[in-house]
Image (cartoon, rainbow, N blue to C red):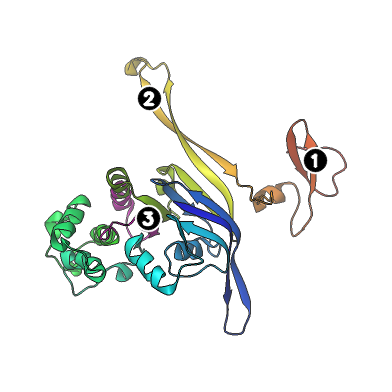
Amino acid sequence: MIKCQDLVKIYKLKNEQEVIALQGLELEVEKGEVMGIIGNSGSGKSTLLNLLGGLDRPTAGKLIVDGKDLLRLSDKDIVKYKLETVGFVWQNNARNLIPYLSVIENVELPMLLKGGRRKRERAIELLEGVGMGHRLKHRLDQLSGGEQQRVAIAIALANNPSLLLADEPTGSVDSKTADIILDVFREINRSLGVTIVVVTHDTELMKKMDRVVAIRDGRTSSEIIRRSYSKKFSVASENDENHERDTHIELAVLDRAGRVQIPREYLEAIGIKDMNKIKIQLEEEKIVLLHPNERKTGSS
């Protein structure tokens, strides 16, 4: 569904100073995947989401979404892409919803812009699908934050997109409501086969995704992959039943040039701070990183 190769985005400030938001980012997302993106402020995750959504253009590299090369699309094709291929759910509901329209009118609006048919019927189907079928005529000020976010998801799905992007969709709701919103995403993914990419800081949300990609300094630094397995253990009251357990494995990401980002806390642990060189050794099929002044082999 998504393929990023050496993706670069450079912004020019008013004083002509350049800011490199993405510097050679590599990323692949499979069709039908539910994937999370995490990273500190300024890491480039929101820039990536804007590029995927067609809200901004890459400076260089390759960005292909659902077979469309976003670097080469015309302005007219980008408008079509935003209407037909991608749906967006923002953290700020003011960007998702129009306050003077009813719930069902909000969901119908994207279909009006596209010129689609079955607007009322389709809007009802979507609102029922996100658990808001009983609120069709309500105004937005009559809904809770979680209900507004579910309406926003229905709006994003109005034109049958193949990709759904969500920017901190649970950032302004409590943990219980966040859980409900994630269940809605899961159900949409299962029933409609929509690929979903979520930018989030919510660690509980991350635990429920199959794959989470971490971005650091404009590059993909690591992936956290969830594995679910059955483990049999002896507890008298539970009759030795099989129980599902989740585990996560974090893998560093190598770009096409063989570069890997090393977490700063790892470098500080071996006494490297504010330095731009490190010693690398190959030992018994292991790659060992050492302080540049280290004379004898240390621990990896």
Classify 240 as above or below 200: above
Residue 216 visible = no
Q: Position of residue 69 (x, y in %)?
A: 48, 61
Instruction: Give the CA distance from mark 2 to mark 3.
Output: 34 Å
With 39 as the anchor, is 17 left or right in this view? right
Task: Please state, as top left, top right, bottom left or bottom right, where the C terminus lies in the image.
Answer: top right
Q: Report which residue position mark 3 lands on.
A: 163
Q: Are marks 2 and 3 in contact (CB under 8 Å)?
A: no
Residue at figure coordinates x 83%, y 49% from the top left: 292
Extent of the magenta region: 157-184
Q: Is residue 173 magenta?
A: yes
Q: Residue 187: which quarter of the image?
A: top left
Residue at figure coordinates x 35%, y 62% from the top left: 88
Considering only order in the chain, which callout, 3 or 2, is on the residue closer to the N terminus? 3
Q: Which mark is residue 281?
A: 1
Q: Report which residue position mark 2 lands on.
A: 243
Instruction: Give the CA distance from mark 2 to mark 1.
Output: 42 Å
Residue at figure coordinates x 57%, y 84% from the top left: 14
Amino acid type, mark 1: Gln
Tally of numbered discs? 3
Amino acid type, mark 3: Leu
Q: Position of residue 51 (x, y in %)?
A: 47, 65
